Image (spheres, rainbow, N blue to C red):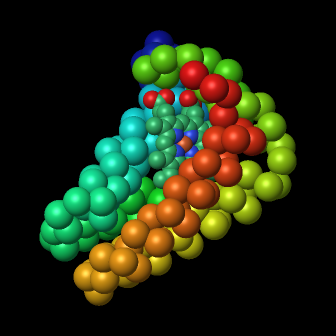
Amino acid sequence: MNKHIRCATALALTLGTLIASTSALAQQGPKPEQLIKWRQSAYQVLAWNTGRIKANVEGQYNKDEVVKAANAIAAIANSGLGSLFAPGTETGKGWKETTVKPELFTDKKAGEIAGQFNKEANELARLASAGDAAAVKVQLGKLQGTCKACHDDFRKKD
Ligand code: HEC
């Protein structure tokens, strides 16, 4: 083999390896720590917005505020939170040590509660835009029932 061809072959091999290892990295996706941070953040934003709606139904009702909060909740519920519970995130630290119970990854009841949570969140957004404060109050209670159901079974006490 002449020297130039050998050089070109070596370069092609090196590039090939680089490309292969880059795409392997891409396929691995975000690190567990990142996924746990995201889900903890998502739940904090849910708590912010359920709190805003609670304040509205218990005090002065402001339809615009409630619509904003309910739409934020529905958007998070519809965003596919399940993907933040990837294998490898059963334990570990995000912003803090995860409080998920390992059962969430194996018990199909978790998926059922998550589906119920989605349904109640979308219904809350619908009622919020209709502007019926009494109905929003009842629906907020239903939504919070799904938060509690999941936490009781699948989240360790802080
Ligand atoms: C399908 C299950 C499920 C539902 C539904 C659910 N949660 Fe959670 N929640 C969890 C799990 C699991 C964690 C622990 C996340 C972690 O630490 O990795 C959590 C954590 C939290 C946290 C603490 C976040 C942190 O900083 O560590 C808050 C606040 C919270 N949820 C609020 C809510 C509210 C409000 C709702 C309803 C509007 C809700 N959750 C619905 C499972 C659920």
Can residue 122 be seen? no
> Which residue is located at x 57 percent, y 62 percent?
117
Q: Nearer the viewer, residue 24 or 45?
A: 45
In this rendering, is residue 75 above or below 35? below
> Which residue is located at x 80 percent, y 37 percent?
103
Split into 4 quadrants, where in the image is the C terminus?
top right
Q: Nearer the viewer, residue 100 or 88?
A: 100
Q: Nearer the viewer, residue 16 or 145?
A: 145
Q: Is residue 95 left or right of residue 28?
A: left
> Which residue is located at x 66 percent, y 48 percent?
150
- For this orientation, the residue located farthest to the right is 107
> Which residue is located at x 39 percent, y 44 percent?
47
In this rendering, is residue 21 above or below 7? below
Total labels: the figure holds 0
Residue 64: % across, % down: 16, 70
- For this orientation, the residue located farthest to the bottom is 130
Residue 148: % across, % down: 61, 48
Residue 42: % across, % down: 42, 43
Q: Nearer the viewer, residue 52 or 30?
A: 52
User: Which quarter of the frame holds ligand 1?
Assistant: top right
Determine which quarter of the picture holds residue 109.
bottom right
Residue 136: % across, % down: 38, 73
Q: Is residue 56 left or right of residue 32?
A: left
Can residue 41 be seen? yes
- For this orientation, the residue located farthest to the top is 3
Determine which quarter of the picture holds residue 98.
top right
Split into 4 quadrants, where in the image is the N terminus?
top right
